[in-house]
Structure formats: C-alpha cells, structure tokens
Amino acid sequence: MSKFSEKTKSWWSKHKPTKRRLIQIYSALLYNCNIRGFATGRIYTGQTKYMCVPGLNCYSCPGAVGACPLGALQNALAASNTKAPYYVFGILILFGLLLGRTICGFLCPMGLIQDLFYKIPTPKLKKNSITRKFSYAKYVILALLVVSIPLVYSLSLTPVPGFCKYICPSGTMLGAIGLLLNPSNEDMFGMLGGLFTWKFALLVVMIVAAVFIYRFFCRFLCPLGAIYGFFSKIALIGVRLDKNKCTDCGLCINACKMDIKHVGDHECIHCGACISVCPSKAISWKGSKIFVRESEVAVCAEKPLNALMSKTAKATDTSKEAYAPLSEQPLNRIEAACIPKAIEQKQEKPPKTRKTRTKRPLKKRLEITAWIAAVAVLLGAIVYYNVILPPPSTNVEIAVGNECPDFEIKLYGHDGEGFTPAEQSFKLSENLGKITVINFWATWCTPCVQELPYFERLQKEYAEKLSVIAIHGTAVGEDVPAFINNKDDWKDYTLIFAQDLFFDVEKDGKTVNTDVYSLLGGEGTWPMTLILDGEGRILFIKQGSLTYEALLEAVLPHVS
C-alpha cells in the first residue's frame, strides 16, 4: 500500500496542472458558463453578450456569455460609417494596457486548446529564423482581414467580417461545430456550403499543426495577439527584465517556445517559463515587489550546483582556492553564472534550528484568497446563467401548424433624412387578417443584407394580400440598429422596419421581454423567416437565408 501511495504521489507531482494551466481552464469555463446552451443548442443573447471577454472566444458558442473582441471589432468597423466604434476600441485598449499578451498566455481558450494538443508526445518543430519571420503573418491578417475588408465593405450594403468569415478557428470549433453537435439543430446542416468546408479543413490543419508546432495559430495567424502585442512594453501585468542584472546568457530565449527576440517583446505571451531558468534573477513579474520579497526563484537547480562543485572541490572544502581550477577549464555561461552561487550556498549553511510554527507569508495568503474569490465568481456565474436566469423559451411550441405567440415591437420609418421611431408599434394580434411574413435580419449579417431585397420585392408585388416586417437585431455595443441613422439605401423600402432588443425593458411598471427572435424560436442563426396565415398560425419556418424562388414557393400557396 505504501508503494502504491508513493507511486501515486510521484505521478501526481509530475502531472499535476500548473497554476497557469488552472487559470487557463478557469477562464475558458467562465467565458462559457452557460452550460444550458450546450444542452438546448441555443446561443445566449442576454445583456452580458454586449460585453467583450479578453480572449478569442466565439460569440456563437452555445456556452458563451460574452462577445469576442475580435468579432466585435470587425462588426464595429463594418458599421463605422454609422458611428465611430468607441466601445470596441476602448475595451481593446483597456485589455492591452492592463494585460497585453498575458491574455494569450493565461486567458485565451484557443491558447489552452493548442497547449493541450502540443502535449501529445510527437517530434516537435523547434523555433528558428524561419518561424520568426512567419510570426509577422498575423500582422498582415490584422491589416487585411480584420481592418481593411470590413472598412471597405462598410461603404456598401454587404458587411464582411473577413477574419471571422474566412479563418477564425474559434468560430468553427466553438461556434459552428458546437451548435451542429446538438440534435435540435439538424436543420442547420442544410445551410452548410463551400465556406464551411474551407473553414473546417483549415481548422483540421491548425489542430494537426498545433501537435508539432507550439501554438501554431497564436504565433502565425492570430490578429488578436497581434493587437495585444502592441501593448507589451507598457502593459501593467507581465514579465519584466532587469537589464542591470541580465548577463545575456540566453537561457530565457532558449527556454521560450515563442518567437521572441528578448523577454517581454511583442511575441512574448508572458507565461513565466523564463523566470525559473534565469541564473541572475533578472526576470520577474511586474509589480511582484508590492506583494513579495525580491525574486524568490532559485538561481540554479540543486543538481547542477552539486555537479559543478564535485568537479573542482570536495564538499568539505569551501575556500575560494578550491575553485581555482575552474578558471583553467572552458566554462559555458550557465556554469559561469552558477559558480558564485555555489560558493555562497556552501559558505552560508544556516544552523539547524528547532522547527517553529510561523504564519503563512503574505504571498500565500493573497494567493489562497484570490483562488477562493475566483471559484466563488465562477460558481455564482454558473448558478446565475443556468438556474436563476429564465430559459430563453416559451410555453408555445414554435412549429408549423401551431399558433404564433403574440408579440409587440417598436417600429421605425424613414422621414427623408434617416430612420426615426414611428409613433406606433407592431402588435401581431392587432395585425391579423392577411398573410404576415416576418424576417429577422441585421446589417452585420451578410446573407441577411443580400436577401432583404427579396422581401421588399415580395411586399411590392403582393401588398394587398400580405405584409412583410423586417426585424433588425442589435449588434454588440449598439443602442440602436446600424441601419437607422444613415442607411438611405432602405429609404424607398415599403416593408415594415422594426428593432429587436436582446434584453428586458421597463413598460408600465413591468419588465417586458422584447427578445422577439428567441420568442419565435430563434436559435442563434441569422437570417430567420416565418410566414403566418391570417389567423396567426405558423405556415413556414426557415433558419438561414432564402432565394426569391424559395420565398415565393412558401408564400404563393397561401395567397388567395
């Protein structure tokens, strides 16, 4: 039994997760604590979805409770002809100033996923001058796909979030696959096409590459890391190098798997691996002296010291003369740095004293307090999103043949200069008697914008027999939809424009849910279309885009 216990302890000491790994897992759980979303296959669209998390975590992941800063940036730039994206710029600058690329090392789920794949025992490709050159590719992707393409298309009616649409592995893995794995989303398979095939193949390549190349996506492709890299030198949290103590031994560069040229540069993810290998204690955490004494990291490991000393002197001889032969031997930089420490350790043996009880050091107490607070926050978030928060569902089953639940929504009309709130709202129960076509769209949704002219054409051709209402969703950081102030392209449209808010509002002293999208069965996919008969019964439901022919085929059989 004792042997088993010893083996268990030995195994645990070798395989136990590091503090950094625990923080990575914690962050991934906190970002995606809406566990109910994985069970229902529905995307959470509540109030916290307007806030950005620091790491790359897809908005469309069923468990996500916040927005991805990179996706929010692209959507904001796509709508930048409406207003300046102050919120997104502000939050990215805030994250950058506080944490910089420490976010990549500790707080990004995609970083965690790559770290786990890299642990698979295979031959590894070491960094070299070629990988260092390729590390600048992410800045090209940032300039082209994240900034340029959304800005160019902001001048047209078709927003294109380039990186999210063509590359983002988080969107494919956490968003698309996360939704498709749920049986309730079987109808989404019909929406898949060449673009999904391309992104899925790219995801597979990235995962395989991550097994052999440390953090393949982070080093070469991630534009969010490129953004945070601009703040590396001025971020409040991260590793720092004291040049006065540095001996230029190069151990920190060799120990780091990223393509850094020096500690703390734009490629450094501040994982802290370099701290334990620095022989001169030149590397430490920024602000660490506020809480603890100056670097407590060992200068050299015990075994190398003993090995170094055994080459030149007996353990009982601590005189400096005993080390004279070292000057005649070729020493590497590691040994040269360790010699003074070896002498110091042998000369300054502390006397044996009786063990006494002491209080936990301040550093340990702060650490325990921080972990208790962190676990409490995580448990509170899980309880809130999965127990306290009411599920985004209705007692009325949304299916063809069933009665559509009644709803009331705010309308907008064009006054010649821009869209303004109309004096009346649209209430379904007060507008029955003819076919009603409901289309959920958004200016930040490319398929939505492409198909909206079909609904306008339908409205004009069958104005006396049906009414079409286009309900716009609200993007992250928007108080009102992007089309309202400047989209003159919609001014000649005759269909009814409305705004859908993804949060509750106060009305007549009561809290009213205005999330019509979820009320009518929305599952996180835009566009969505419903067709109702004159009595409010559901005739047709479609998650995803439609052609004009498909729209006519769904409507004409019911138009008398």
Image (tube, rainbow, N blue to C red):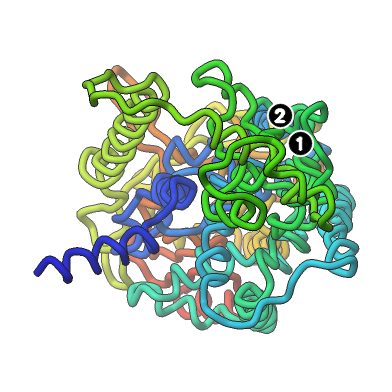
Q: Residue 327 or 410: which is nearer the viewer?
A: 327
Q: Position of residue 50 (x, y in %)?
A: 53, 37
Which residue is labeled 2 in the image?
235
Specify whether 448 is left or right of 536: right
Q: Position of residue 346 (x, y in %)?
A: 54, 37
Q: Position of residue 348 (x, y in %)?
A: 52, 28
Q: Residue 237 or 180: which is nearer the viewer?
A: 237
Which residue is labeled 1 in the image?
232
Measure the C-alpha gap from mark 2 to mark 1.
6 Å
Task: Give the SS element for disc 1.
Answer: loop
Q: In this picture, is 451 found above or below 189?
A: above
State which quadrant residue 446 falls in.
bottom right
Amino acid type indicated by mark 1? Ser
Residue 7 appears anywhere in the view: yes
Q: Residue at x 55, y 37 (%)?
A: 297
CA neighbours of label 1 inside 10 A, class few (<14), some (14 to 19), many (20+): many
Q: Position of residue 328 (x, y in %)?
A: 84, 53
